Image (cartoon, coloured by chain):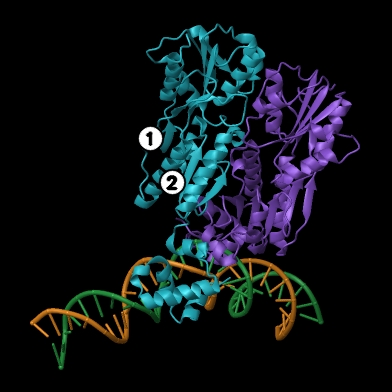
Chain colours: A purple, B cyan, C orange, D green
Amino acid sequence: MVSISDVAKQAHVSKMTVSRVLNHPEQVSKEIFDTVQTAINELGYVQNRAGRALATNKSYTIAFVMLDEVAAVDPYFGQLVTYIADILNQAGYTMELHRSLDNDFHAIDGILVSGARESDDAQLNALTYPLVTYGEQAGAASVDVDNAAGIKLAKQHLVDAGYEQLIYLGLDLDEQFAQARLDGFLDSEIPVDQNNIYRIANDDHIARSLVQTLQLAPKTGIVAATDRLALGALYACLIDQQAVPQDVGIIGFDGIFIHQMGPLTLTTIAQPLERIAEAMVSQLLEQIEQQVRTNPHIVLTPELQLGDTTLHN
Amino acid sequence: MVSISDVAKQAHVSKMTVSRVLNHPEQVSKEIFDTVQTAINELGYVQNRAGRALATNKSYTIAFVMLDEVAAVDPYFGQLVTYIADILNQAGYTMELHRSLDNDFHAIDGILVSGARESDDAQLNALTYPLVTYGEQAGAASVDVDNAAGIKLAKQHLVDAGYEQLIYLGLDLDEQFAQARLDGFLDSEIPVDQNNIYRIANDDHIARSLVQTLQLAPKTGIVAATDRLALGALYACLIDQQAVPQDVGIIGFDGIFIHQMGPLTLTTIAQPLERIAEAMVSQLLEQIEQQVRTNPHIVLTPELQLGDTTLHN
DNA sequence: TGTTTTCTTGTTACCGGTAACATGCATCGT
DNA sequence: ACGATGCATGTTACCGGTAACAAGAAAACA
C-alpha cells in the first residue's frame, strides 16, 4: 500500500507537505502543490483512514443502529438507510450498520438510531457520542414526522372527497407513533364515532379479519394507520366487492407502497423520508462539529399523496 | 478516552502485557491476567480500532455495496443486509454500507456486492480487496440461488396440484436472474406453451395489465418470476373474480411477501436468505484469512414454501 | 542596510496499538 | 552446581498520519 511517505519521496518534499496538500492546500505554494498532486496521481495514493483517525481522533464514520426487527423487512427502512448512507458518503463519512446497542462502538464520530423503544432509554442515555434518533426520544436529539398532523390531513381529505362515515384502522399502541396517529384521529374538529375505531395486531391477516368485521356502509372513508393496513383494507374491499374509490375511500400512511404494489395506487400520507434523512444527518454533523450534545426535537410535516383509492380531481 | 497505557499504569505492567491479555491471553500468567482484567473493567477500557488497524493492517471492517436501486425498497434487501450485518458483528467485524463502487474504499478488509450488472464488471475487477458478490459474477467469488431449479420446483408443484395449463409471468431480461428463471421454466420435462409466457415491465401496474391480458382457463397455474408479480396476479384474479386456489393457482419466487401482505399467503419458492448471508460472509472471511482471492460460485437451492394460493394437503 | 514580519517548508513528537526481539528468572538435566 | 531450556514480561521501533513548533528565505519596513 502506498503511503504518504512514498508520495513525499517521489515529490522530494517532506511528509508534512504532502499532508498539507491534502488538508490545508492554501498553505502550500502553487508549484509544490502541483508536484505533489502529480506524485499522488502517479502512485495512486489514497489516504489511510486508520492513520488519520489515530492522529486526529476523528474517524469520519457514523453508526446507524436499526433496532426495530420489523423495520428490516419494511421497505421504508431500506429507503431511509440508503438515503442516509448516500448523504453521509457525500459529506465524506462512512456509515456502519448495527442492529443492537450492545455492540461496542469503536472509532465512530456519532450515532443514528431508529426504532428505539422505552426499554432502550437507559442504554441510549449511557452513550457519550453525538446522537440523533428517528422518532421522539427523551434526552436525545430526534427527528420525527408529525404523525397527528398527518392523520388529520387524511381525515380532512376524506371528508373533502365526500365520504360520510369515517373508520380508523390502527395498530397496537406499544410503539409511540401508533399512539400519536390515533391521537391525531381523535383530536380534531371532525367528529368521529368511537365504534369506528379498530385495532389490528401487526401479524393479523388484515384483510381476512377486516372482511369479517367491517360493515361498510356506502360512502365510507377508511383512515389506515399504515400503508400495510391500507393495503389489507383494499384487499378486504375487493373480496367484499366494494367499489373503490366510489363507495369506499382508503387512505394510508407512510408513502412506501404506492408504486407498483396493487391494482390501485394508494392515496397516502407520505413521510418525507429524504428530508428526514437530511435532517438526521445535518443535526448529527452539527453536534459533531460543535462538540456539544444538544437535544432538539425536529418535527417534519408529512404530505398528502393522491392515489386511486380515494376520490379527487 | 482511556487507552492501553492507562490500563498498563493502573495494573503496574507494560502496555505490551495489556495487549497480550487482549490478544494472546495464553501467553500471560493467571495472576497478571486477572490484575489486568480488573484494571480494564475499572477503567472501562475499550480498544481503539484505529490504533489496532494501523498496527496490524487489519480493520475488521467489511464494505457491503448495494448497487441495485430497486433493491433498496425491496424487503429482501433489508432482510439480507441485516442478516449480513448480524453475522459480521458476531464474527467481530463491522459492516459499512455503500451505494456505489465509485467511493474510495479505505481501511476495509473485504467487499460484499449485491446487484451488480455487466456494466460494473470493470470496476469490480479493478478492486484488489477480497470480494464476494450476490448473484453470478465473472471473475469474482459469488453466492447465488439456483434460479432455474427453483422455477422447475414451482412448475412441478403446480402440476402435482392438478393445474392443467401453466402460465409464466416474467420480468424484463436485463438482470441475470430474470433470464435464469425464464430458462428454468422453458427447460424441463413438463412441456409449456410459448403463448403462455408473459413479460411484465417492472414498473407496470401488474394487476391492471394482467386482467386485460390473461384469459384464465379453469385449472390454470401461474408461475410468477417474483413475489411481487405473484401478488399482482393475485390482485388480478380477485378483480376478475377467479377462485384462488381452486380454479387458479399462483406461485411466486423470493419468499418475502408471504407474511401479512394479503388476504392469502403466497405459495412461493423461498430464497434461503440466511444461508446466502452466511455463505457470503464465510466465503469472504476465508479469503481474508487465507490472503488469496478465489472465485468459487456457490449455488444454493431454494425451497418450496406452501401458502394459500395453490392447492395442496 | 539592518531588523522585523510573513510565507513556505521541515523536524519532532505523538495518537494507540502490536510484532519482534531482549531480558530476567525459574526449572531442568546431568 | 552448572549451563541449557523455557516461560513471563519488558523494550524498542514502527504502522500512517497530523499538530505544534522550528527554521530558513523572501518581503516589508525603518
Q: Amino acid at mark 2?
A: Thr
In terms of depth relative to the viewer, which is nearer, A13 or B305?
Answer: B305
Residue B99 vs residue A222: left or right? left
In terms of depth relative to the viewer, which is nearer, B54 or A243?
Answer: A243
Q: Name the residue rendered at 40%, 12% in the picture.
A: B190
The label shown at residue B128 is: 2
Residue A11: x and y in percent read: 52, 60
Location of residue B70 with respect to A215 vertically, above or below = below
Residue B207: x and y in percent read: 64, 17
Residue A40: x and y in percent read: 53, 54
> What subunit carries mark 1?
B
Q: Are marks 1 and 2 on the same chain?
A: yes
Question: In the figure, residue D5 lies in which quadrant?
Answer: bottom left
Of the residues under marks 1 and 2, which one precedes in the sequence? 2
Q: Amino acid at mark 1?
A: His
For the residue carrying disc 2, how many other residues have a C-alpha within 10 Å: few (<14), some (14-19), or many (20+)? few
Location of residue A37 with respect to A243 vertically, above or below = below
Residue B30: x and y in percent read: 36, 75
Cα separation, mark 1 vs mark 2, equals: 19 Å
Q: Is residue A8 visible?
A: no
> What subunit carries mark 2?
B
Q: Secondary structure at mark 2?
A: loop
Q: Name the residue rendered at 85%, 21% in the picture.
A: A313
Residue that label 1 marks: B297
Q: Which residue lies most toward the right here?
A: A189
Residue A310 vs residue A64: left or right? right
Q: Secondary structure at mark 1?
A: strand
Query: Quarter holding the N terminus of chain B?
Result: bottom right
For the residue carrying disc 1, how many other residues have a C-alpha within 10 Å: few (<14), some (14-19), or many (20+)? some
Q: Is residue B287 visible?
A: yes
Location of residue A196 with respect to B238 vertically, above or below = below
